[in-house]
Each structure stands twice: as structure tokens, then as C-alpha cells.
Image (cartoon, rainbow, N blue to C red):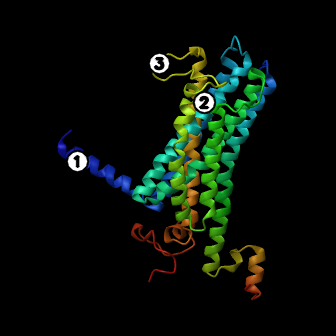
Amino acid sequence: MSSHTKTSAIHKFKVGFHRLGSPSNFYRLCNRLAPWFWVGFVVTATIGLYQALYVVPPDYQQSDSYRILFVHVPSAWQALAGYAIMAVLAAIALIWRIRTTEILAMACAPVGAAFTFICLATGAIWGKPMWGTWWVWDARLTSMLVLLFIYLGIMGLYAAFEDRRKGARVACILVLVGVVNIPIIQFSVEWWTTLHQGSTINLFGESTMDPSMMPPLIWMTIAVKLMFTAVIMQRASLDLIDQDRRKRWVADMIGGTREKTSENNAGTTIGDEK
Amino acid sequence: MIPEFEYAAYVWSSYAIFAVVIAWQAAVPVLRRRRTMAELREEYALRAGNYSYARDDNASRITSGDRR
């Protein structure tokens, strides 16, 4: 590839990236991609659930109760990954003041909270027959509960402000403060003696889990990631339209005005244009 | 067809929680979109003077001159 072609490709990428900052482009992109992510979720979750419930054999110690792992572990991973994504978006939003990243960061919170809830609830259900108790105040469980409270706090803080942008900025600061909880969750089983077992699945080392049990776990992990992406896109596009309800691009999209406007005045407020 | 498990109640209740939460996450944006679009269409219709488009209660109030 010649240097001119390379420069041109980089330029095109930059232009494409900056165009995403345009609310109308961002809205259109989210609405086009979200259904495909949902399709991906349905396909991968169907394969994953079939394998988890019909294909993999029972565990020699835990019998069938270990099948809970196939919804518990992907949810736990997604709760943590969702927070990491939200933190990166919050940092970008605070540093560069990009509104779409602000909105995306705030869209992560309810979905992350949902996965944290699934993780805690299914963990408690697994704990009753295996540990003999629904709940213990050990480091892993408690730090996961703290993560749920942080997610709820972010959602509450964002909703508390009438000015959504101010709310998002304040909530983004809380997101960054809450990052401290992520390594605590991750390493809690190593730093403290916990009833929760240590890592059984290592991406870069040898897993103590039987390889025959891995495929459904991988499929379900992919499924929840696709679902997370689909939902944040849908939520972000709705937040955007809600914030911009008096802007020209929204009017054009709804078809409420007869005048056709160019991309350049997408940020124009209705009634302001002369 | 439905597999018989040991600890079946625990397994199925976990999968049920997962399904309900996922369904909830799928439903919320759809419902919110429907509500937002209806609000926006009504708002733009009223602004354009198309009072017949507005919801019945609002429309009757506006056409009767009651602008509370």
C-alpha cells in the first residue's frame, strides 16, 4: 500500500470517527446496528443455552447445580467489563467533552446493574445447595454487592439533575471514583480468604474447568456481550433524542416539519433558525 | 424434552432470573421509544397547528379554547 493510499485511509477513518459525534449520524448508526446485535445475541444464546442444558455432562461433585455457572459467570464478567467500558467512556467524556460518549457511558449503568443483579441472584441460588447458605459477607460477594450499589448510585445521580449534561458529568466523576472497586472484585479471592472459589478459568493459563464444559460458557459470554452492546446502543439513541427533542434533526426524523435541512444545521433549535 | 436435573429448582430458577432480566432489558428501550416517539409526534403536530393529531384529552381542551 502506498503512503498516499495509507494517508487517505487514515483521513477517511478520522472523518468517519468525527462524523459519529454528529447526533443524527450517531442515532442512525445505533438504530441500524442494534437489531443486528440482537440477532447475534439470539443465535449465540440459543446455541449456548442448548449446550448448557442438553449437551454438557453433570459435574462429578456438584452434579447439575454447576449449570448455573453458564449464566452466572458471563453475567459477572459482563458486569465488570461493562463497568470498565463505562469508565473509559466517562474519562473520554470528561476530558474531551464529547456528548455521545457521555450518553453512552450513562447508558452502560442500567445494563451493568442488571448483569450484577443476575450475578448476585444466581450466585445466591447456587450457594444454597453447595455452600449451605444463600449469602456470606465474604470479600468477593460483598465487593460485587458494592458494585451493584455503585451502578445504582450512578443511575440515581444522572437522573437527579434536570440538566442531563450536568448530571452526566457529575455521574462520570462517580464512575471514575468507583473504578477502585474493580480490582478489589477481581483480586478479592487472592487477597483474602473467601468462601467463593478462586479463578477456575484462565484465558492465558491452564483452566481447572474441564474443556468439555467450555463451549457453552464461551457462547453465553459472547451472547451477553452482544446483548450489552445492543441495549446500550438503543438506550443511548433514546437518550440522545430525548435531549435533542427541540433540535432540527429530530424534527426532520419525526417528519414534523416540512422543510428539509442539511447536515450542517442538525444542531439548530426549532424556532431559532431565521 | 425438558431435561431432568438434580437441584432442578435451583437450576431453573437461575435461568428464569436470567431470562426475565434480559427480557426486561430488551423491553425497556422498546417501550421508551414508543412513548418518546408518540410524545414527539404530538408535540410537532401541535406546533404545526394540526390539533386533530393530538391526544383526545389535549385536543378537546385546546379546541375548546381552554389553554391551561
Subunit ID for the residue under disc 2: A
Subunit ID for the residue under disc 3: A
Dot 2 or dot 3: first in sequence order is 3
Disc 3 target residue: A205
| Residue at (66% x, 46% y) in the render | B25
Type of amino acid under label 2:
Met
Report the number of numbered marks. 3
| Residue at (62% x, 54% y) in the render | A155
Disc 2 target residue: A220
Dot 1 or dot 2: first in sequence order is 1
Query: In terms of secondary structure, where does tag 3 sit?
Result: loop
Q: Which mark is residue A7?
A: 1
Q: Is residue A12 above or below residue A260?
A: above
In the image, which is nearer the foreground, mark 1 or mark 3? 3
Q: Is residue B8 above or below residue B32?
A: above
Q: Farthest top residue?
A: A60
Classed neighbour count for the residue bearing mark 3: other residues with Cα under 10 Å, few (<14), some (14–19), many (≥20): few
Q: Is residue A261 above or below residue A12?
A: below
Q: Position of residue B20 (x, y in %)?
A: 73, 40
Subunit ID for the residue under disc 1: A
Classed neighbour count for the residue bearing mark 2: other residues with Cα under 10 Å, few (<14), some (14–19), many (≥20): many
| Residue at (61% x, 58% y) in the render | A157
Type of amino acid under label 3:
Gly
